[in-house]
Amino acid sequence: MDTVDLKQPELYTNRLLSLLEFNDRVLDQAKDEAVPLLERLKFLCIASTNMDEFFEVRVAGLKQRIDLGVTQVGPDNRTPEEVMNAVAERGHELVAEQYRVLNEVLTPALDAEGIRFIRRPRWSTAQWEWLWRYFEDQLLPVLSPLGLDPAHPFPRILNKSLNFIVDLEGRDAFGRSGGVAVVQAPRALPRLIQLPPEETGSGPNDFVFLSSVIHAFVDELFPGMTVNGCYQFRATRNSDLFVDEEEIDDLRRALEGELPQRRYGAVVRLEVADNCPDDMADYLLEEFGLGREDFYRVNGPVNLNRLLAIPDLVDRPDLKYSGFTSGLPASVVYPSDLFGILRERDVLLHHPFQSFTPVVDFLRQAAGDPNVLAIKQTLYRTGPESAVVDALVQAARAGKEVTVVVELRARFDEEANIALANRLQEAGAHVVYGVVGYKTHAKMILVVRREADQLRNYVHLGTGNYHPRTARLYTDYGLFTADPEVGEDVRKVFLQLTSLGRASDLQTLLQAPFTLHAAMVEKVEREADSARAGRPARIIAKVNSLVEPKLIRALYAASIAGVEIDLVVRGMCCLRPGITGVSDNIRVRSVVGRFLEHTRLYYFSNAGAGELYGSSADWMERNFFRRVEVAFPIRDPELYRRMLRELDLYLRDNTQAWVLTSEGSYHRLQPGEGEEPVSAQETLLAELAEAY
């Protein structure tokens, strides 16, 4: 048999194009009539926000590579310029589809439910009068129009802010001829204005866009001048922070100095209203140094994601997902002695179907327990006013030895993490910022408790962040255990993060950047050896992204050897399944639904002695080589069986699952004739949570 070249570019999908396809699947939720209407609007806004971040980070990085003359190609053998062209083409298609869905699908459906966006041609006399007063009282005092001339150069435009370019005619008070002006809408202003029914005769859920109000009364900003046109625009900027890790001596101070510059990074995309004349658009492109591939005309508000406010402003529970109360494991009944429970058995939580509250209570009990000596925790994202941070502050003030590894470089959470680090330090906690050059992405809590004449370690390990709000929105696993070997490994990892010294040998955990990647490749190759020997061989993995080339090649080789491989990959997937002679035995699916899939699980059949790991790490280069991550084994037989059963639900899902084809495209599964519909998320919600 001829050896297959597993480095052929045809075997790999470009990572950025794959990420855009994920956003297409999110956008599809906005079109799905089985999803409640206001939730469909949310999905549209999420898709828009995803595109913003895609340009701020991914496209910005790609442009930097092009500017630096980088010619290195990826596994798909595309140059940065080729990727940029493909991204621009697909990006324009997706943005156009977003606005088509808004204008042709969602707006009419919302209108039919009495939720209306009132455009200027439809304003009644009462609405005009009320909006004029609103403009005069609330907007006019804070708007600062900027006429452009040699003394007033083009202003610095905040990242993703709402702006207007105004075409003027006539002479001002100083005799200057009209030309062009820019009006910036302060971020403090609401982007949607709810019309009061009693004063305007409007419906209870009638809204007007801030942009419409400014358009209507923009001439008030330029007395004596004629406004020939007013057009909204928005610039998206590079939002990655640069910190020279070899030169800094204080990471926190370096980041604090860099954060303000994020708002004014290089512009990577320009969005303008679709009625903006070409000469105005060309003027803006020249000012921002952009080409036509970076230019997006949109039929609607340029800040589409601001519509996310609507579901909170509209009291229509019939147009939203039904509420639920996250459940609790039978072993955790309040009030509970969690330490006593963990001495008897491990406890597994599957969020959001099961509550995040036991994680906070674990810290609170530790804070109030006189026998607890020390608490150590990693924090990547935790949100403002976090109950997790409150518990750590309580513990530090109670005299516990509290050590918190705060990752200051968690993208878009840097400022919040600096603030919580300061708060923890003020309470007396030891705060460290991880290891320069490696983001600390592992999710770990270690509680050291004195019991009789010994110290016992209690541990929580998770696949997702210690963030109470996202624990209601993302699917994640959290494992509590008092297993001595696991506890000792966690202690060693914390020692690495807070002190100096060589990497320790770990008995149970796999750790990036040291052992995780090599272990994954070795375990895949072990399955291939089993298949060649005629033994059953199986791999199941659930991750957010699959990108790392060496692991992909190992999976291809395992497929060729006969290993049955099922992959649930939410977002980027550079592997191509179903290619004859290469990936015939690999199946890839993506599940997109009410909750953002975030769990990372790895299963290897291991010749009948199956291994199952939960992890904080995706299968990407950054997770394997540039982050501190851990993968933890599920050693409790009952929890092992439960997690495999729940994982199997995702493999049987035929309502929210998308199957990846060998060409790199996705198609959504539908139940066949006579086939029972299966939704993994809905099944878990019914089994583990309580509806209300």
Image (cartoon, rainbow, N blue to C red):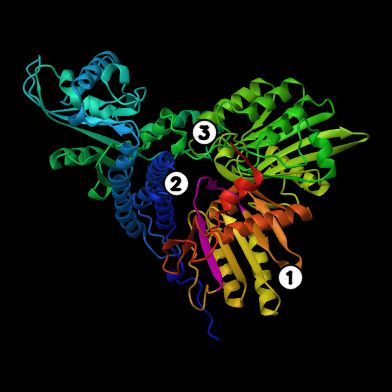
Give the CA distance from mark 2 to mark 3: 34 Å
Nearer the N terminus, badge 1 or badge 2?
2
- The residue sitting at 47% across, 61% down in the picture is 670
Q: Assign a secondary structure to mark 3.
A: helix
Whether 596 is among the magenta residues is yes
Residue placed under numbered mark 2 in the picture: 35
Q: Position of residue 573 (x, y in %)?
A: 49, 59
Q: Quadrant of the C terminus?
A: top right
Whether 205 is among the magenta residues is no
Residue placed under numbered mark 3 in the picture: 414
Q: Closer to the camera, 235 or 565?
A: 565
Amino acid tagged 3: Glu
Nearer the N terminus, badge 1 or badge 3?
3
Give the CA distance from mark 1 to mark 2: 42 Å
Question: What span is colored magenta in the figure?
Answer: 585-600
Nearer the N terminus, badge 2 or badge 3?
2
Would residue 454 appear left or right of 128 to someone viewing this image?
Answer: right
